[in-house]
Amino acid sequence: MKGVKKRFRLSTVLYLLKEGTKNIWNNRSMSLASIGVLVSCLLLTGAATLISLNVKDVVKSIGDKNIVYVYLNDDVSKLEAIALGQEIKKVPNISECVFFSKDDAIKQYQESLGEIFNEMTGKSNPLPNAYHISITDLSKYKETVSKLQAINGVNKISNRSDVAEKLTKLDRLVTSAGVWIIIILGLISLFIISNTIRMTMYARRFEISIMKSVGATDLFVRIPFVIEGMVMGLISGVISSLALMFLYDGIMAAVNNIVSFKWISFSSVYGAVLVIFIIAGILIGAAGGFISIGKYLKKEGGEILGW
Amino acid sequence: MIEFNNVSKIYQSGTHALKNINIKIDDGEFVFIVGSSGAGKSTFLKLIMHEETPTSGDIIINDISLADLKRKDVPYLRRMMGIVFQDFRLIDKMTVYENVAFAMRCIGAHPAMIKKRVQYILKLVGLSDKMKSRPSELSGGEQQRVSLARALVNNPSIIIADEPTGNIDPEMSYEILDLLSEINKHGTTVIIVTHEQELVTVFGKRIVEIKDGCVLSDTSLNRAVELDDVDDFFFG
Ligand SMILES: Nc1ncnc2c1ncn2[C@@H]1O[C@H](COP(=O)(O)OP(=O)(O)OP(=O)(O)O)[C@@H](O)[C@H]1O
Ligand SMILES: [Mg+2]
């Protein structure tokens, strides 16, 4: 069959687009159900992702602010302290290491709390010399701290490992739960959409049998159903990103009542959410359309009609 | 040209629908396929349309061996044929015009071309004034003519009709067959499956009779075969 023109002309493409959207309307109750399911799936997925992003953000900001104080023994002189600093710097997983002398410390107290500390300067200063260090990877907090502790001359270390550990755990949980949510809800959406399209196809089986008998290509028969899925996906993507926008600030404010933190503003992620939701919706829809028509395309004549 | 060489068809169920069929139909021929119910007539047409594939033997249509035909080329094979069904198979939510235009849309024809051609074909089958009607508003004969118009609209080189007169009265049947022989005069090969032996003999065309999956007689072959059949009929 050489020399046959196989490209579609514009009028044909428009015709197929129209047929696809008509399918949605003709099968509107099922289409609506599909869109509903897809919207819920996208919303849950989006919410899980945003929560994970927020937790990551909080963990990171704690990591930034989390300057661990390494207090030195009282009997360590200033010179010895400098040598100690070199040793501290050698410990892995430390990004910054600043010496903070007992004089600096008391000055800070004086500045923030006033004159009651005036008498504690010089020899009567009860505060220890310290190093302020920041830890790069909070998940290795414990290891790092024990290494610091092992250094001779280190007295004690301000301990915030609990918070760091809990947040890291939470982040891991949210991330892995998020991945599962995405996979499971994606499969559910795919299942529902392909079933809806299968229903449209069943309703149109008579036309499909005629299309095949007059020589329509598989692609031509398939396109309207794939478009049907894609349009449902597009609609779902738009609806769910709008819904997420309205829900997000409310949810975050509610969460903020329990634990106070500064959440990521939705406007900073809205563009990405919209694009990702629309692409995800369209992909799931197209896949649904593709899956469901495959079985029908292999059938011939009366078989399609169930005779 | 359509050529069947030693074609047999055994369905999954084990039914031996066609047995070692050898038939040659030349371009521009007009052939009636007759035979009783279950003889294998529809199976014969389905093999031509490539809705079914033979269990053994070769089928060659317009120099294409169907055994070598790739799946993606099947639609282009079908575009060479126009198919008329006994039950018309018209889409009732479409008008007569749309039903015929649908066949052209399916092969990606140009809209201007569709408009021109559909009007021409509907005039040819005498349905210009019913263009906007729904199939359900038409008589059986009219519906069959719409079905015929749809089969003709893509200008096929072969027209295949499975019992085109099965659901209409004799007068209408005659009209449809007349229309088909008119189309045949312009060079289109016409293959018609029918029960109605009487109607067929009136037309004086080639008649192939199938019985139990075998070719019982073929008027295009020499008379000796036919006389054998007559002998069979009276004495066999
Ligand atoms: N899809 C199928 N699967 C199994 N057996 C089939 C199938 N189609 C037809 N047959 C069988 O093959 C034989 C021939 O059937 P076919 O439809 O070709 O007969 P026919 O000559 O067209 O009969 P009719 O005049 O009743 O339409 C019959 O015995 C029938 O039951
Ligand atoms: Mg039959």
Image (cartoon, coloured by chain):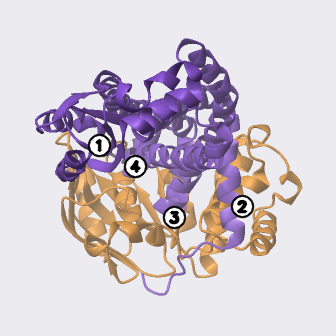
Chain colours: A purple, B orange
Give how far across and how far down residue A169 sits, in percent. 30, 27
State the separation of the CA atoms marked 2 and 3: 14 Å
Please tell me whether mark 1 or mark 4 is closer to you in this view.
1
Closest to the observer, B195 or B21: B21
Q: Are marks 1 and 2 on the same chain?
A: no
Quadrant of the rendered image containing residue B26: bottom left
Left or right placement of residue A32 versus residue A11 in this view = left
State the separation of the CA atoms marked 1 and 4: 50 Å
Closest to the observer, A170 or A191: A170
Q: Are marks 4 and 2 on the same chain?
A: no
Give how far across and how far down residue B180 sits, in percent. 62, 66
Q: Could you tell me the amino acid type at mark 2?
A: Ala
Image mark for residue A269: none
Chain under label 4? A
State the separation of the CA atoms marked 3 and 4: 17 Å
Closest to the observer, B160 or A179: A179
Mark 3: secondary structure: loop
Left or right placement of residue A42 versus residue B5 in this view = right
Quadrant of the rendered image containing residue B23: bottom left
* Of callouts 3 and 4, the N-terminal one: 3
**Location of mark 4 (residue):** A294
Q: Could you tell me the amino acid type at mark 1?
A: Asp
Q: Could you tell me the amino acid type at mark 3?
A: Gly
Please tell me whether mark 4 or mark 2 is closer to you in this view.
4
Chain under label 3? A
